[in-house]
Image: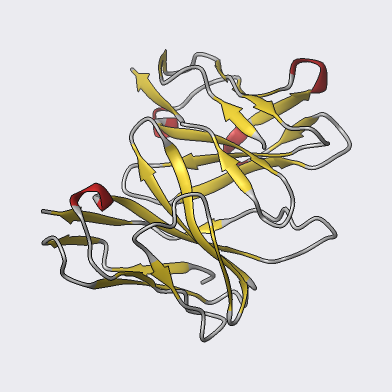
Amino acid sequence: EAQVTQNPRYLITVTGKKLTVTCSQNMNHEYMSWYRQDPGLGLRQIYYSMNVEVTDKGDVPEGYKVSRKEKRNFPLILESPSPNQTSLYFCASSLLAGSSYNSPLHFGNGTRLTVT
Amino acid sequence: AQSVTQPDIHITVSEGASLELRCNYSYGATPYLFWYVQSPGQGLQLLLKYFSGDTLVQGIKGFEAEFKRSQSSFNLRKPSVHWSDAAEYFCAVGAGYQKVTFGTGTKLQVIP
């Protein structure tokens, strides 16, 4: 089954304790992205990757890191989490198709992170 | 830069009634427009998309949307709502190179 898998689904941690949220897709998609969802703000992009070893900042990258060493994986790293990073996080992937690259996104089921 | 406005934060409809969710966008060129649905505890799922051509697009689960360039709108409609349609709905505009901007969402409640 084609899917984007995120782990863990729920995570409670303390301020400053490094954590990683994993994301894997089995659709051979070039493009992968991380979003955070907060009430009243919709989805905001954190980082994205157009292909292996190619990553770039989205709209809210502060406090986050990513890597893309393999096509299927795109982990999100919080080196020193803070309470304002408490949020619902989504990983998404898509093909880079067509001349303008506006393919629909495929989303994981989300990771709810609480930082105390 | 592009932007998307979903003016209704929360909408309640009776089961069997018709539904229209509003979406207005701002973008300088021809937009790529999407509607996604998020069921509780799930990720977002694509309902439908508009790239070009016929301005009335059909999606999954009986939804349709109409692109109106003159009004910068892409409203989502369904003639008869089912209880399983209760979810949050997001409109989004694509600006190329996968630069997608999402609206803030509309939560749909369906009452029996």
* Residue, far bottom: A69
How many callouts does the rendering have?
Answer: 0
Residue A105 occupies which quadrant of the picture?
bottom right
- Image x and y of residue A3, in percent: 49, 68
**Closer-to-camera residue (A29/B31):** B31
* Residue, far right: B53
Q: Residue at x 24, y 47 (%)?
A: A84
Locate residue A112 relative to residue B45 in the image: left or right: left
- Image x and y of residue B56, in percent: 78, 28
Residue A24 occupies which quadrant of the picture?
bottom left
Q: Residue at x 55, y 15 (%)?
A: B18
- Image x and y of residue A66, in percent: 44, 72
**Closer-to-camera residue (B61/A80):** A80
As displayed, is residue A86 above or below residue B37? below
As displayed, is residue A79 above or below residue B7? below
- Image x and y of residue B55, in percent: 82, 29
As displayed, is residue A94 above or below residue B53? below
Way the structure is coloured: secondary structure
**Closer-to-camera residue (A37/B43):** A37
As displayed, is residue A45 above or below residue B78? below
In the picture, which quadrant includes the N terminus of chain B?
Answer: top right
Q: Residue at x 70, y 42 (%)?
A: B49
Locate residue B99 relative to residue A58 in the image: left or right: right
In the picture, which quadrant includes the C terminus of chain B?
Answer: top left
Locate residue A46 relative to residue B21 in the image: left or right: left
Q: Residue at x 80, y 42 (%)?
A: B51
